[in-house]
Amino acid sequence: MSKKTSTSDLLGKVLSQKATTPIQENKNGVIKPVEKTFLLSLPETKLQQLKQIALDKKTTVRNLINLAIDDKYFNH
């Protein structure tokens, strides 16, 4: 039989381990820009249309939205 571990024992193990933060590595000379996650709610029909446009243009919805924001607000 296996020994049962109490919650406090598990918590003690977790707290005793040193936390490490993953570091972005520079692979093949490519450095990715820092990005933040942002939740966007859209009507289902708009999202479906964006997905179809992205598929037709061989890109992603994420890229379409970023391009639209750049065009509308940053390239005047």
Image (tube, helix red, strand yellow):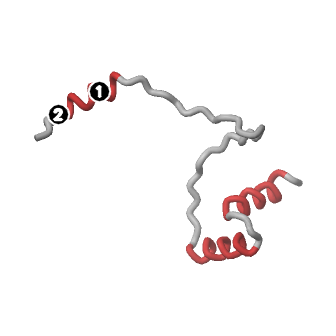
Of 71 and 8, nearer the camera is 8
Q: Which mark is residue 5?
A: none
Q: Is residue 51 above or below residue 26?
A: below
Q: Which mark is residue 13?
A: 1
* Drawn side of residue 13 relative to residue 38, left or right: left
Q: Secondary structure at mark 2?
A: loop
Residue closest to the far front: 1
- The residue shown at (25%, 32%) is 10
- The residue shown at (17%, 34%) is 5
Residue closest to the far right: 76
Horizontal and vertical percent position of residue 29: 77, 38
Quadrant where the N terminus lies?
top left
- The residue shown at (56%, 55%) is 39
In the rendered structure, which amino acid carries the disc numbered 1?
Lys
Mark 1 and mark 2: Cα distance apart in space:
11 Å
In the rendered structure, which amino acid carries the disc numbered 2?
Ser
To which residue does mark 2 refer? 6
Dividing the picture into quadrants, the one containing residue 15 is top left
Dividing the picture into quadrants, the one containing residue 34 is top right
Q: Secondary structure at mark 1?
A: helix
